[in-house]
Image: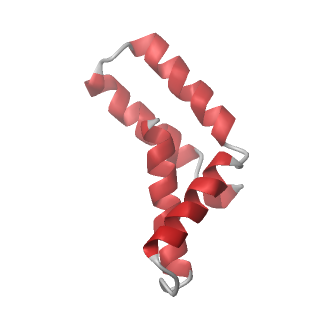
């Protein structure tokens, strides 16, 4: 779920910038999580993460850049 978390926080940052943080942080975080859970990328990201772990096990050195790449390629603003 690292990539999912990265996507949520990246979208949270986007929301805070776009709305000048007019609402509270909690409201924006809730919106970001809801957006991710209902997004076009949620299922795809889960599959990609599962495939990465199956292929590389728990090799953190290898997985970290792969998970970051998954997050970058599946940003929520693109949905």
Above-or-below relation of 72 to 43: below
Residue at x 65%, y 40% (from the top left corner): 42
Query: For the image shown, how many numbered marks are present on the structure?
Result: 0
Residue situated furthest left in the rendering:
61
Q: Which quadrant does the C terminus fall into? A: bottom right
Q: Residue at x 42, y 32 (%)?
A: 66
Place of residue 32 in the rendered image (x, y in percent of width and height, measured from the top left): 57, 60
Indicate the position of residue 7 as horizontal and vertical percent values.
51, 51
Task: State whether residue 66 appears in this view.
Answer: yes
Q: Note whether 43 is above or below 38 in the view shown.
A: above
| Position in image of residue 52 (x %, y %) | 48, 21
- Front residue of 70 and 24: 24
Please, is residue 27 above or below residue 10 in the view? Answer: below
In terms of depth relative to the viewer, which is nearer, 36 or 75?
Answer: 36
Q: Nearer the viewer, residue 66 or 57?
A: 57
Q: Using residue 36 as the reference point, say whether residue 49 is left or right of it.
A: left
Q: Is residue 14 visible?
A: no
Q: Quadrant of residue 45?
A: top right
Residue 25 % position (x, y): 44, 73
Q: How is the image coloured?
A: secondary structure
The residue positioned 60% from the left and 64% from the top of the image is 31
Residue 57 versus residue 66 in the image, above or below: above
Choose top left, top right, bottom left or bottom right for residue 63.
Answer: top left
């Amino acid at each position: 779920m690292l990539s999912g978390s990265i996507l949520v926080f990246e979208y949270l940052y986007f929301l805070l910038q776009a709305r000048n943080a007019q609402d509270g942080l909690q409201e924006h975080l809730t919106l970001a999580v809801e957006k991710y859970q209902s997004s076009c990328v949620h299922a795809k990201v889960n599959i990609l993460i599962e495939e990465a772990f199956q292929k590389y096990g728990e090799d953190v050195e290898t997985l970290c850049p792969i998970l970051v790449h998954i997050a970058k390629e599946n940003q929520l603003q693109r949905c």
